[in-house]
Amino acid sequence: MRNTGDKQQRIASDVELEADFVVVGSGAAGLTAAITARRRGLAVIVLEGEDVVGGTTARSGTWIWSPNNRWMREAGFTDDRDDAIRYMARLSFPERYQPHAERFGLDEHEFEMLNTFYSVSGTALEELAEAGALDPVVKANAPDYFADLPEDKAPYGRVVVSKGRARPDQLTGAEWVLDLRDATLGLGVEILFGHRVSDVIQNDRRVTGVVGTANGKSFSIKANRGVLFATGGFTHSPELMSDHMSTPVRLGGASKGSRGDFMRIGASLGAKLHNTAAAWLAPIPLEALVKDPQSTTTNIFALRGDSMVMVNKYGNRTVNEKLPYHELGRSMLRWDAMQAEHPDLRMFMIFDHSARVHFSDGTSGNPIKPPSEHDPNLVEGKTLEELGAAIRRRVQELGPVHMASLEIAEGFEANLKVTIDEFNRHATTGTDPIFHRGESSIELFRNGPARPGNQNNAALFPFDATGPYFALILAPGTLDTKGGPAIDSEARVLRASDGQPIPGLFAAGNCAGFPSGQAYWAGGATIGLAVTFGYLAALNVAAMK
């Protein structure tokens, strides 16, 4: 860090700038903060390390999860405070959750973070709507990811989206970040691209600016009131992923800017670290990343298809394929102590021609491409036996590094046939007695409508009697990590030594230690938290004298 002590000292830089509030990162957290601060009269500069706006928000589904927001109330939904916090606490801290205890069994900090999110998230969205950065509508048919839990008293109405253009129901992530950008620029905020921050400036232990590089030159920016880091997680830092992920998650579809910059900067400042072993998880197509490690590959938001299963190296189903993507990602990290292995670390999504016809809708996060579109990552076979053999060859071609040392087991081809025969037998009646696929609200919502002729269970249908059959190789990946320097309910970064705020330093979004633990409450929880704490950071900076 640059510590200038009690006296202001000139820092040698090629470019020197000044603002009231410096925001590092241009995703939902950073641009919400910039808009909020500028609307209160502050001079704001936004620094983006990449050459495009939006960070991982630009790659998202742009749902925003907001308990008790104004629009859900106007639509007739009720969301009681205690009920909402119970739901969040039950999922985030299941080992401590007590429904009738004080703070529901949570410690004071955990409870206050969830309580603040409940209180403020809707107000933060109203700020964006007033600024023209959000055209809000409640996605009233979208359930929470655990809508069937008894704790979830308001399973519908918490998801807000911005009205659609390219697609009628909602904006895409790429579209919404442009609206955020335009609102930010329209207020007179400067956004500087290609500016990567490497350190902070301190005066008498207060953060008073940042330093970094852009286009091969150094820069320094003085921040008269505060600095917000909203730089994303550390998905694209192999070192940090290895050090902090407790299970072998090494891939992800986050923005390439998610390199853990603030993890390193915060640690150098003595910040307390929080939730660093957690991530927003989802399966990710393996071969796209193998062929181009620098590509930014979209995670899978739903395993589409009714005549579809996911099998492991033994050719066996191990999970309900229609679970929310985060839960699928977690299931792939299962450790088999008897065999001393992660048998599901690479999984094979098996489907037939009919699934390609009925479920290849071209939406982001759907791995099934239409029959008319060539997919070089697709493994094919005219029969299930041929498909099994083709999978075995593809795995050998990929090699042990990309396959995480998993090898296809003996008998895979025979087991695959048995697995699909058993699936077909039950799918004919619309049942899945082992994994109960298609029985929860979110599964049926993500699956989409039933194909013509399926009157039993929209998520289940027997495989075609004849080929071709197809497979994709999947790995557990992150949408991004969600741990880092700890923050309080005012988005202030906390010191490890005494738990007190580091003056002038704020964080929001995936670079900060999120209060959600390992949980993913619903679609849009990531952005809902990012917007809320970006908003809070700006309010606190604006209130400074």
Image (tube, rainbow, N blue to C red):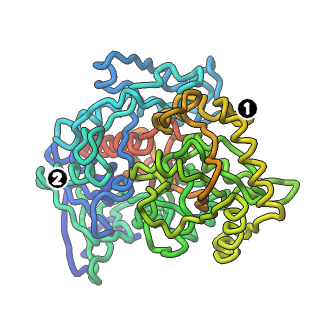
Determine whether 98 is above or below 234 in the image: above
Work out whether residue 23 or residue 390 is closer to the camera in this orientation and state it. 390
Residue at the outermost right position: 338
Name which residue type carries label 1: Pro
- Looking at the image, residue 17 sits to the left or right of residue 526; the answer is left
Q: Position of residue 491 (x, y in %)?
A: 39, 45
Q: Identify the image quadrant of residue 58.
A: bottom left
Helix, strand, or loop for circle 1? loop
Work out whether residue 111 or residue 477 is closer to the camera in this orientation and state it. 477
Q: What residue do we see at 53% from left, 27% from top?
A: 147
Q: What residue do we see at 32% from left, 29% from top?
A: 138
The residue tagged 2 is 182
Q: Name the image quarter holding the N terminus.
A: bottom left
Name which residue type carries label 2: Asp
Residue at the outermost bottom position: 216
Determine whether 74 is above or below 65 in the image: above
Q: Position of residue 341 (x, y in %)?
A: 79, 60
- Looking at the image, residue 379 sits to the left or right of residue 69; the answer is right
Work out whether residue 129 or residue 389 is closer to the camera in this orientation and state it. 389
Disc 1 crowd rating (10 Å Cα; few below 14, some 14-19, many 20+) is: few
Q: Position of residue 256 (x, y in %)?
A: 41, 67
Determine whether 215 is above or below 34 in the image: below
Q: What residue do we see at 30% from left, 61% from top?
A: 208
The residue tagged 1 is 433
Q: State whether residue 153 appears in this view.
A: yes
Cα separation, mark 2 vs mark 1, equals 51 Å
Q: State whether residue 484 appears in this view.
A: no
Q: What residue do we see at 66% from left, 57% from top?
A: 347
